[in-house]
Image (spheres, rainbow, N blue to C red):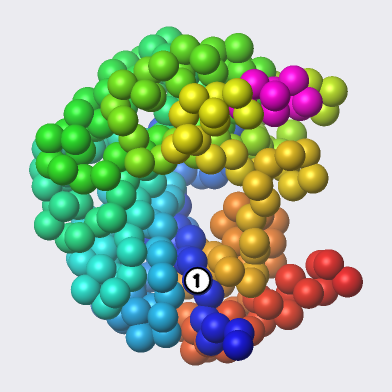
Amino acid sequence: MEPRFADRLEWEVTRACDLECRHCLNRSHQPRPRELDTEESLAVAAELGRLGCRVATLSGGEPTLRSDWPQIAQVLARSGVIVHLVTNGQRFGRTEARLARAAGVGGVQVSVDGCDVTHDRIRRRPGAFAQVERAAGRLVDAGVPLGFFTTVSQDNAAQLDDLAAWVSRWDPAVWKIWLGAPRRGRLGWLPLDALPNLMDRLSRLQQAHPYLRVQGRPGQGARPHASGREVLGLRSDGTVTTSLALPDAPGLGSVRHSPLPHLWRAAKAARRQLHC
């Protein structure tokens, strides 16, 4: 029997961001016009629980730039939804770690694209890697499950073994590696003929680090998103799409104007059209 709602929700709680990373499609780094306010966001969070959504990932932009992110997370968690938070770690100190734990966040993934200067160069901020280490330490101290998220490109592919050694020091719950599409941002993306070697390296790393998960580039050996069937995307202005991992995916309607079950059915229909 088909579930009545998406298993997972990817929720961009704001487009605002305090970094200008080389691989990011977010050109403005500013909030979207008319982002959902606190009352609207909390209503959506409660509804997700009633509909049986299992996991909600709060991302951005940078989600901690919204002062109400702990409230959103808490309502989700109290509604029975497992809450994950993705952050660049630049503002994540003791206070944020304690708020995450108090809100019932089930895991925080900190973005890291290399060791030390490599990460700083990709993130376009000196000292960004030091802030990632600080955030990871605060999360461990607070007892919040820690994970990492890495986007692979020519700028950091050669450093994956060193990065794996650094990640392993934290005994993370998960390390997600994203093989981004060549058209994303301004990084030097790996050519297609380099992918077989990269996938062999990642396979060896997975044997040593079973918490590593590879995503992106369907058809190239990576795990694809199950967009529209298991996953639903929610932009910060209330627009629903098949997945936030597909930035060009059309909007299917807004939670301001349509019930979430109706929007999920629209997402499933859009996915079927893509694969027919």
Identified at 20% across, 38% down, the residue is 139
Identified at 32% across, 60% down, the residue is 83
| Residue 54 figure quarter | bottom left
150 shown above or below 241: above
Residue 78 located within the stretch drawn in magenta: no
Q: Tell me the element at label 1.
A: loop
Is any part of residue 14 visible from this angle? no
Magenta stretch, main secondary structure class: helix
The residue sitting at the right extreme is: 276
Is any part of residue 233 visible from this angle? yes
Residue 180 coordinates in the image, percent (x, y):
65, 37
Residue 218 located left or right of residue 47: right
Quadrant for the C terminus in the image: bottom right
Task: Report the amino acid beneath label 1.
Answer: Asp
96 shown above or below 275: above
Identified at 47% across, 12% down, the residue is 162
Residue 126 coordinates in the image, percent (x, y):
36, 15
Which residue bears the numbered disc 1?
Answer: 7
Quadrant for the N terminus in the image: bottom right
Residue 164 coordinates in the image, percent (x, y):
46, 21
* The residue stretch that appears in magenta: 195-202
